[in-house]
Amino acid sequence: MKSIVAVCLLFAGSAVAQCDNKTHIVDVPYAKNSSYFAGQYASLLDKLALDTQAGTGYLLLEFSVSQNQSTEEKRKYNKWLAERRIERVKNQLNKANFSVPVITRILTASNDITRSVSVAWCPDETDDQIIQIAGKAE
C-alpha cells in the first residue's frame, strides 16, 4: 500500500512540474478570514465538472500564501486557511462527480496578498475542448 501511495505522489509531483501550458479557468475568491466562496462559484465548478469529463489532463488548484507575516502563529493560521479554501473547491468538484485528477499546491513564498484559489487546466496534450471551456468561464 505504501508503494502505491509513493508512486502516486511521485506522479503528482512530476505532473505539476511539467504544467507549462496550463490554461487559467477561474479564480475562486474568498472574503478575509473565510473559507467559504460565493454560490456563483459553486455553480461554475459544477459546470466545469460536467464539461471536462472527457478531458485528458488534470486540474491544478493553487493558492498563494504571503511570506510577509509577522508571527509564526499568523503563518500557521494562513497556511491552515489556504488548505481549507483549496479543500472547499475540491469538495465542490467531488460533489459534482468530477472524475479528472485534481492536483493542489500552496505557494508559500509569494509576495502577493490574494484570497483566491486559482483553477487551471493542465492538458496531457492539446485539448481544444478544455481551452474552449476556459474561454467561457472568464
Image (spheres, grey):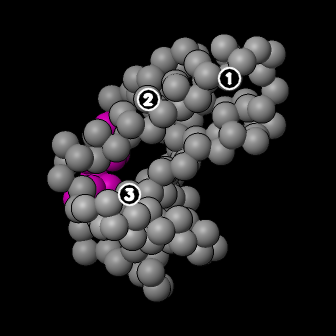
Q: Is mark 2 on a helix, strand or loop?
A: helix
Depth-wise, is mark 2 or mark 1 nearer the camera? 1
| Residue ID for mark 3 | 102
Q: Is residue 49 part of the magenta span, yes or no? A: yes
Position of residue 121 relative to residue 106, above or below, is below
User: Which disc, if any, is residue 75?
Assistant: 1
Position of residue 47 relative to residue 109, above or below, is below
Please give left or right for residue 107 compared with residue 125 in the image. right
Q: How far apart are marks 2 and 1 (CA)?
A: 14 Å
Please give left or right for residue 137 compared with residue 90 in the image. right
**Amino acid type for the residue under numbered disc 1:** Arg
Is residue 41 visible in this depiction of the protein?
no
For the record, the magenta segment spans: 40-50
Q: Which residue is drawn at 67% across and 34% down?
A: 65
Q: Residue at x 38, y 57 (%)?
A: 102
| Residue ID for mark 2 | 84
Q: Which of marks 1 and 3 is nearer the N terminus?
A: 1
Residue 42, by quadrant, is top left
Q: Is residue 27 part of the magenta span, yes or no? A: no
Q: How far apart are marks 1 and 3 (CA)?
A: 25 Å
